Amino acid sequence: MEAVRARHERAVKNGARAFLYNQRLHLIVLKGTRTMFYEYATACSDRLASLHDEMKNRSPATVRPGCSLSADDAKQRILLRANSSF
């Protein structure tokens, strides 16, 4: 993104109008993509935090009576389920 910004500033300095239009479009697309990734990462982080809180508040007996999963297996299943919901 910094390289695109530097090219844009150079085009402004040199007065290359046709190039400026393309560079502005490119910058807009990059900024929009960055924003969408940030929003997605924030949503994933919030979801994982709520799942973590939910798991901390449950006792092993209330999760599933008679469940023979080890703690590591249960954690992996939870992470797989969380990743597949997005």
Image (cartoon, rainbow, N blue to C red):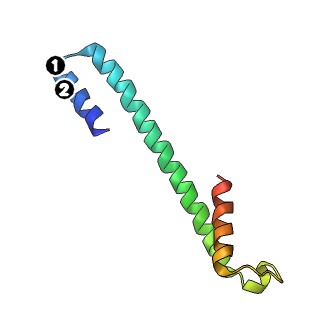
Assess disc 1: are there few (<14), some (14-19) or many (≥20) residues with their C-alpha within 10 Å of its C-alpha.
few
Q: Amino acid at mark 1?
A: Asn
Q: Which mark is residue 1?
A: none
Q: CA distance from mark 1 to mark 2?
A: 6 Å
Tell me which corner region of the image, top left, top right, bottom left or bottom right, holds residue 73. bottom right
| Residue 2 on image: x %, y % | 27, 39
Residue at horizontal 50 percent and vertical 43 percent from the top: 36
Q: Amino acid at mark 2?
A: Arg
Q: Which mark is residue 14?
A: 1
**Residue designated by label 2:** 10
> Against 75, is 85 above or below?
above
Is residue 71 toward the left or the right of residue 37 in the image? right
Badge 1 vs badge 2, beta-carbon distance below 8 Å: yes
Tell me which corner region of the image, top left, top right, bottom left or bottom right, holds residue 55. bottom right
Q: Say what secondary structure mark 2 lies in.
A: helix
| Residue 69 on image: x %, y % | 73, 79
Residue nearest the viewer, comparing 69 with 40: 69
Tell me which corner region of the image, top left, top right, bottom left or bottom right, holds residue 1. top left
